[in-house]
Image (cartoon, rainbow, N blue to C red):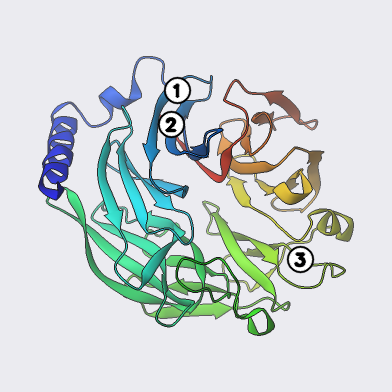
Amino acid sequence: MLRRQALTLGSLLRSTLSLGGWTLFKGKNAGPLLLSARDDADGRHYAVGYRLDGSQVFATEVKQRCHDIINHPQYPIALFVARRPGTECYLVDLRDGRLLQTLASPADRHFYGHAVIHRSGDWLYTTENDTRDPGRGLLGVYRFEQQRLTRQGEIPTHGVGPHQVSWLPDGETLVVANGGIRTEAESRVEMNLDAMEPSLVLMARDGSLLSKECLSQTMNSVRHLAIARDGTVLACQQYMGPAEDTAELLAIKRPGQAFTPFPVAATQLRSMNHYTASVAVHDELRLVALTAPRANRFFIWDLDSAAVRLDAPMPDCAGVGAVKDGFVVTSGQGRCRYYDCRQAELLAKPMDLPSGLWDNHLHLLQA
C-alpha cells in the first residue's frame, strides 16, 4: 500500500512538473480555493475544497476529523492535519481530492491539529504531544522523500501542549503557540488547570530556542496564530479560569516588541465567552479578524490603531481567512459569509457554500 501511495504521488509530481506547475490546478476561471475540514449530518469526516462561488472541487472522506490545512509551495497537494488528539493526517491532491498518503503519528505521539511546510518544499513540521510525558510539546519533523512523507525526528517546542505553528516572514523562524495544557493519549481532558504553562515561542528549525514569552493570566491558553507580512504575530486564546473573570483573548507581538494583549474593549472580551477559534490578518487593508464561536460573535479591528471595525453576531462562526477585499468566514451551524472591508462601512454577504458543520479553520489558496 505504501509503495502504491508513493508511486501515485510520484506520478502526480512528475506530471505537475511536465505540465508547467500549477497550470492544470488554476483552470480557466479559477478563484481562491477554500480548503477546510467538514462533517456531514451523519458525523462522517471530509477533507474538502470549494471555490468561493460555492462550486465543489472535492470532498474526500477521511477516517479522522481534521483541523488545519497546509499546501505544498510547489505542487498541487495539501496536508489535512488531524484534530487533537488525532493520529492521522491526509495528503490530498487538490485537483481532484485523491488521497495520496495517510500519515500516521508514531507510538506515544498524537497530532495537535497544525503543521507547516518549509518554503523549500522538503520539510514538514507538525505539533505533537509526547503521551509518555503528557503535554510535552514536540514538532515532528518529516521530509518529502521519494515523493512521500517520512519521519526524520522531532524537536521540542520548549513548552506544553503546542497548538499552532507558523513561520515568520523570513521563512526560517518558527512561531509556536504552546497552549500550556497537559492531556493524555486519546484525551481532551485537561490535567493541569491549576498549573498551566502557556507561552509564545520563537525557535530555529534546528530546535534552538530564540525567545519564550508568557501573558499575565496563566490560565489563558495560547492557541492560534496569524502572521502579518511585516512580522507582526497575532495569537488568540482560550481562557480556562473562572467564568466571572475578564480574560484578554487576543495578543500581539510586533517586530522587536514584547508579546502583549491587543487592546480590546472589556465589553468585547466579556462577550467572547472565554473562547476564540480562529484569527486572520489582512496585510493590504491592515485588519485583524477573530471568531468567537461559543459567543456567536465575529470581530474585525484595525491592526495599527486597534479601532473596532466590526462587532457582529454570527452563529457558531468558525474559520476565517483573508481574500482580496476582505474576509471569508465559515460556520459550524449557519451560512458562511463574505465581508467586504474596503469601505468605512463593512458589507456582509451570505455565500453559496454549504451551511454548517465546518471546522474552526480554513485555508485560502490563491490561484
Could you say which is closer to the camera, residue 75 or residue 137?
A: 137
Mark 1 lies on residue: 56
How busy is the neighbourhood of tag 3: few (under 14 within 10 Å), some, or many (20 plus)? many
129 w.r.t. 69: above or below = below
Separation of disc 2 and disc 1 at Cα? 6 Å
User: Mark on residue 49?
Assistant: 2
Residue at horizontal 48%, vertical 72%?
202
Residue at horizontal 68%, vertical 49%?
290
17 w.r.t. 237: above or below = above
Residue at horizontal 16%, vertical 47%?
147
How busy is the neighbourhood of tag 2: few (under 14 within 10 Å), some, or many (20 plus)? many
Separation of disc 1 and disc 3 at Cα? 38 Å
User: Mark on residue 320?
Assistant: none
Whether residue 103 sits left or right of residue 327 in the image: it is left
| Amino acid on which disc 1 is placed | Gln
| Amino acid on which disc 2 is placed | Gly
Residue 265: image location, x then y, percent:
85, 58
Element carrying mark 1: strand
Quarter of the view holding residue 117: bottom left
The C terminus sits in image quarter: top left
| Amino acid on which disc 3 is placed | Glu
Earlier residue among tags 2 and 3: 2
Residue 136: image location, x then y, percent:
45, 79
Residue furthest top in the image: 28
- Of tags 2 and 3, which is closer to the observer? 2
Mark 3 lies on residue: 248
